[in-house]
Amino acid sequence: MTNISLKRWGVNRGGVQMSLVSALLLATVAANAEKTAAKAANKGSEPEVVPTVVSIAQRFATFRCGVDAPKSCAMSTRPGTVLEGFKWGSSRRDVVNVYAAPDGIYDREFNPLLAKVAPGMVMQELELARENKKSALDQGFIEFADHPTGLDASPLRSEYTYRNGESALIVPERDARRLFFFFGKAPNDHFWKVYEELPLSEKTALGASFRDAVKRLEVAYGVPPLVRRAEGAEGESWATAEIQDARVHLRLVDRSREKIVGLVLEDRQTLASLPKLRNASGDDPFAIDPAVNAVTRGGISDPNAEKAPSATPPARKSLKKKK
């Protein structure tokens, strides 16, 4: 009966079997596609994990300054202490003293030069240059309060917020610039991040490109860093590469267009508390006050000002001819 019925409709048994096989194949392909899409969605929702190493300080000097790194390039292995004796939680005045105090960074920089010259004009010029560097430190202080700053138009804009008690101290270096970031008002401000702008070149330890710097970071610490895109306030984006240990978060920032790379060290304890510390609205200081905007939307007018003459002349009265 079955064969007769199938033949009546122009379909044989083999055709039915092929139709069933095709349907099963299509169903299998569709199911696999759904599984793949689900995995991709889950992968996208999973938080990215920053690789953790035993100690960033252990190999930091070699990574940042090369095999023959000077002592000034080393990171301290003592808890809470970073670059050249700077401690997390230090005040801005403490950071300034690390540079300007007797036998501080600037004294150690100039002492070898002073030792090579005899008393006289050259020695006086060197001493004056040293004292000028010390006195210029406070001029690099920026407070992110209610007014925009010169850093807002730079790639550093995403490193701070306004109206949250944040500030920075900019210190020029020989071949770079170093920025110390703080939370809180002086004298209770505390240091939590340092951002170095280092040159990219074939002659530097980090190499001639951001890719070179990332590769050397991987070689130094034995793990590939987490590389991702960062988004700026104005829609710009750049790449970052990150690793961390128990107390320090290290981040490279791609600024290849400027022939530099950003090297950022952050206190992980403060980093984890940023949502609480940055609790202000973060409104753009460039924005016009809403009240002012509402008043000026239709144009500003002075109620006491005289009315401007009409652009169209008044209509002339027709003169009646005398009879």
Image (tube, rainbow, N blue to C red):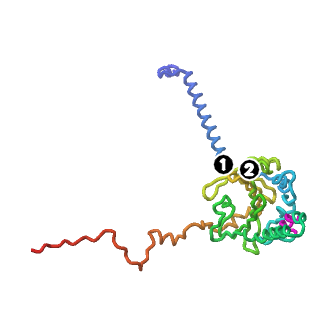
SS at mark 2 in the image: strand
SS at mark 1 in the image: helix
Q: Which residues are magenta?
A: 103-111
On whether residue 162 falls in the magenta region, the answer is: no
- The quarter of the picture where residue 71 lies is bottom right
Of residues 58 and 173, the one drawn nearer to the viewer in this rendering: 173
State whether residue 48 is above or below residue 24.
Answer: below
- Residue with the mark numbered 2: 226
In the rendered view, does 296 fall on the left or right side of 230? left
Q: Residue at x 87, y 70 (%)?
A: 120
The majority secondary structure of the magenta stretch comes to: helix
- Residue with the mark numbered 1: 44
Q: Residue at x 75, y 48 (%)?
A: 208
Quadrant in which the C terminus is drawn = bottom left
State whether residue 164 is above or below residue 46.
Answer: below
In the rendered view, does 176 fall on the left or right side of 305? right
Residue 299 screen position, x and y as percent: 45, 70
